[in-house]
Image (cartoon, helix red, strand yellow):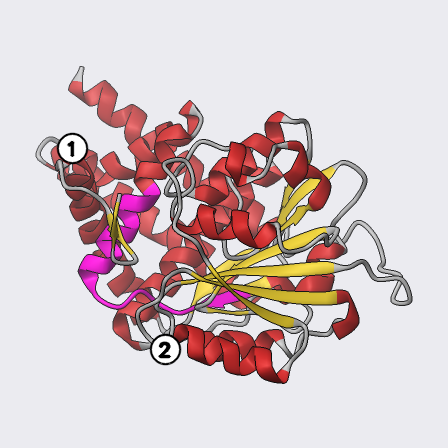
Amino acid sequence: MISIIILIITASYLLIQFLNAVIVWLVEYDEPNNLLDEKHLPEIAILIAARNEEKNIKNCLENLVNLDYPVNRISILIGDDQSTDKTEIIAQSYANKFPHIKVIAIEKGTKRLKGKANVLAQLAKQTKASYLFITDADITVHRLWVKTLLSYVKPGTGIVSGLTVVSHEGFLGRMQQTDWLYFMGLLLSFARLKIPGTAVGNNMLVTREAYEDVGGYESIPFSVTEDYKLYKEVRKKGYITKNIFHPNATNISAPVSGFWKLINQRKRWLTGAMDLPYYWWFVFLVFSLFLPAVIVYWFQHPQIAILLYLFKFLIQSITIRIQQYQVNIRTSIFTLLWFEIYMNILTIVSALYFILPIRLRWKNRTY
């Protein structure tokens, strides 16, 4: 019985890995649905939730003010979520120089509206723009980000979501960069198979029509992963959602500093993922149990167990290499070796921390 379970786990894992590798190899990036009329570009608003981001918000705003988009058709709304550092001061200095930037002091949330969802709900009320672009204060956007996401909108579209990777600052940054790239690629592969996943909350476009149709964040049950909740409600209304891979729609996130902050981030994701469809939990389960399954199998057939693990590492490494090439990221083979160790440790610790009855703490708030 145990051998059958191990066979199911390892075979499912390797099949998912193989299909992901094939899709990544065959589809370099997505072609746009339409060409934008440069003379009649729509009015858009960029919504940014900012809480204690004094280290990152300057870089974020520097990129946003240099977007390739007419300033008279764009507004940048920064929600200062009761920051205790210099976030508001830095953001306001940009608002003083650029008329299309506005800083809004965010009011305390309610039981339904908390955290980032509360910020976005209040910011959305400040604009009548046809398209809402959502990103974070620790994100660097491509100068063609807005135009690229817009080019994938077609009648019936509710959400378009791009790719986000982490900058490679330090060892932990390099590991997070590889981690995000690989699992974002897995999300895109599922989307290409018409299997919905989620939107990327720091790299997404939401049409005003879809946002209003679901009643905004005020009408959506609270979740620490507010991006998935919005994505889910928009799909329930019958709107098209699109996850895209394109170099011009690839955002760069600052890495999480410190291992325990990283573990808390994982707990936040897993907590929000409780609402995901069963097939995603099957994927999570298979990915979590592959290493234990191989270890158990090693006591019975060590040679086969080693071959299974080497095959897994080979497929995973080839997939990551292809993805790195597509987004112009270069790392050494040693990064992939370290990533293997990193992922094994992170998966085990994250699973244990998720099970323990410890409340989630994020952005100096407890949920």
* Residue 129, label in figure: none
Three-letter code for the amino acid on which mark 2 is drawn? Lys
Q: Three-letter amino acid code at disc 1?
A: Tyr
Where residue 163 appears, as percent x and y from the top left, is 54, 57
Residue at 36% across, 53% down: 314
Q: Residues within 10 Å of mark 2 (few under 14, many from 20)?
A: some
> Does label 2 or label 1 sit earlier along the sequence?
2
Does the magenta segment cover residue 268?
Answer: yes
Mark 1 residue element = helix
Can the viewer see residue 22 in this picture?
Answer: no
Is residue 220 positioned above or below 318 on the image? above
State yes or no: discs 2 and 1 in contact (Cβ < 8 Å). no
Nearest the viewer among 120 and 135 is: 120
Image quadrant in which the N terminus is located: top left
Query: Which residue is found at the position 34% from the left and 62% from the top?
Result: 176
Q: Residue at x 21, y 66 (%)?
A: 258
| Residue at 38 percent of width and 70 percent of height | 53
Q: Is residue 180 above or below residue 97?
A: above
Q: Residue furthest top?
A: 1
Q: Whole-percent x and y of residue 117? A: 46, 46
Please provide percent x and percent y for residue 217: 52, 40
The quarter in which the C terminus is drawn is: top left
Residue 295 showing in the rendered view = yes
Highlighted magenta segment, given as a residue range: 251-269
SS at mark 2? Answer: loop
Number of numbered discs visible in the structure rendering: 2
Drawn side of residue 288 relative to residue 196, left or right? left
What residue did someone put label 1 on? 297
What residue is shown with label 2?
86
The reply to whether the magenta stretch includes residue 194 is no
